[in-house]
Image (tube, helix red, strand yellow):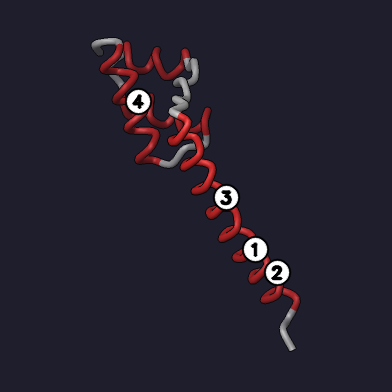
Amino acid sequence: MLSEASSAARRQRDTSVRLARIERRLALVIEHLGIVEPEPDLPEVVRHLENGNKIHAVKAYREATGEGLRDAKEAVDRMAAQRSL
């Protein structure tokens, strides 16, 4: 008999797998439709970039958006390039 903790862990894992599948399908639909999500307006991130502190800008971006490190760094790099910073 499974313990309540292992049962909860299995449900969590199953939910994570289903969510990943849904996110992957949604990304395919968005790509197919040619929808481009605009970068969020993040004045704190821009302020850090203007002050030459990219690490703080990435941290602020992650806190504001919940993105992972790699995606946040790429987004901040795009923001910096658009502003020639």
Q: Residue furthest bottom?
A: 1
Residue matched to label 4: 76
Residue matched to label 2: 8
Q: Position of residue 28 (x, y in %)?
A: 46, 42
Q: Is residue 60 visible?
A: no
Q: Earlier in the sequence, mark 2 or mark 3?
A: 2
Residue at the image point whose x is 54% and y is 54% from the top: 21
Q: CA distance from mark 3 to mark 4?
A: 26 Å
Tell me if residue 62 comes above or below residue 39 in the rendering.
below
Frontmost residue, 20 versus 79: 20
Q: Amino acid at mark 3?
A: Ile
Q: SS of the residue at dot 2?
A: helix
Q: CA distance from mark 1 to mark 3?
A: 15 Å
> For the residue carrying disc 3, how many other residues have a C-alpha within 10 Å: few (<14), some (14-19), or many (20+)?
few
The answer to whether the residue labelled 2 contacts the one labelled 1, judged by CB atoms less than 8 Å apart, is yes
Residue 12: which disc? 1
The answer to whether the residue labelled 2 contacts the one labelled 3, judged by CB atoms less than 8 Å apart, is no
Tell me if residue 2 comes above or below residue 27 in the rendering.
below
Q: Position of residue 50 (x, y in %)?
A: 32, 11
The answer to whether the residue labelled 1 contacts the one labelled 4, judged by CB atoms less than 8 Å apart, is no
Residue matched to label 3: 22
